[in-house]
Amino acid sequence: MRTYHGALLVIVALVVLASGICTATAASVDEFPPEYACAKILYPGECDRKACHDNCFGHYRGDGLCVRAGCQCRYKCKPPPLDI
């Protein structure tokens, strides 16, 4: 019975650790200095919010936002320097 409880405790601990790792959020475009973030209008004119977001994420891994000019895609264009 002790072996069963020990194994169960190890399994629960692994699940808790794994779930914490899997739920880490990625850095958004806003978290980088302006020199590392780029923006471009994907298409001018009328904008569909979902299509804008999907196209921007699919092409640039960025955030698509409908603005007056059309679908604006903000994305990370170069990596920031490493902290060594």
Image: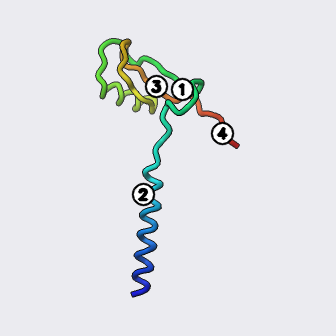
Label whose residue precedes the other's in the sequence (4 or 3): 3
Question: Residue 10 appears at what percent x and percent y?
Answer: 45, 73
Instruction: Depth check: give the residue in front, 31 or 61.
Output: 31
Residue 26, placed above or below residue 8: above
How are the residues colored?
rainbow
Mark 1 to mark 2: distance in Å?
30 Å
Residue extending farthest bottom? 1
* Secondary element type, mark 4: loop
Q: Element type at marker 1?
A: strand
Task: Give the residue number, with chain letter if any, for mark 3.
Answer: 74
Q: How many marks do you count on the picture?
A: 4
Three-letter code, disc 4: Leu
Amino acid residing under circle 3: Arg
Q: Which residue is identified by label 2?
A: 19
Q: CA distance from mark 3 to mark 2?
A: 29 Å
- Distance from label 2 to label 4 (Cα)? 27 Å
Relative depth, front residue between 25 and 59? 25
Q: Which x, y percent locates residue 53?
A: 36, 28
Seen in the picture, residue 48 relative to 57 is either above or below; the reply is above
Q: Are marks 4 and 1 in contact (CB under 8 Å)?
A: no
Amino acid type assigned to the residue bearing label 1 in the image: Ala
The picture places residue 57, in percent across and down from the top left corner, at 40, 31
Q: Which mark is residue 82?
A: 4
Q: Earlier in the sequence, mark 1 or mark 2?
A: 2
Q: Earlier in the sequence, mark 4 or mark 1?
A: 1
Asked if the residue at tag 1 contacts the one at tag 3, i.e. Cβ–Cβ closer than 8 Å, the answer is: yes
**On screen, residue 23 above or below 80:** below
> How far apart are the alpha carbons under marks 4 and 3?
22 Å
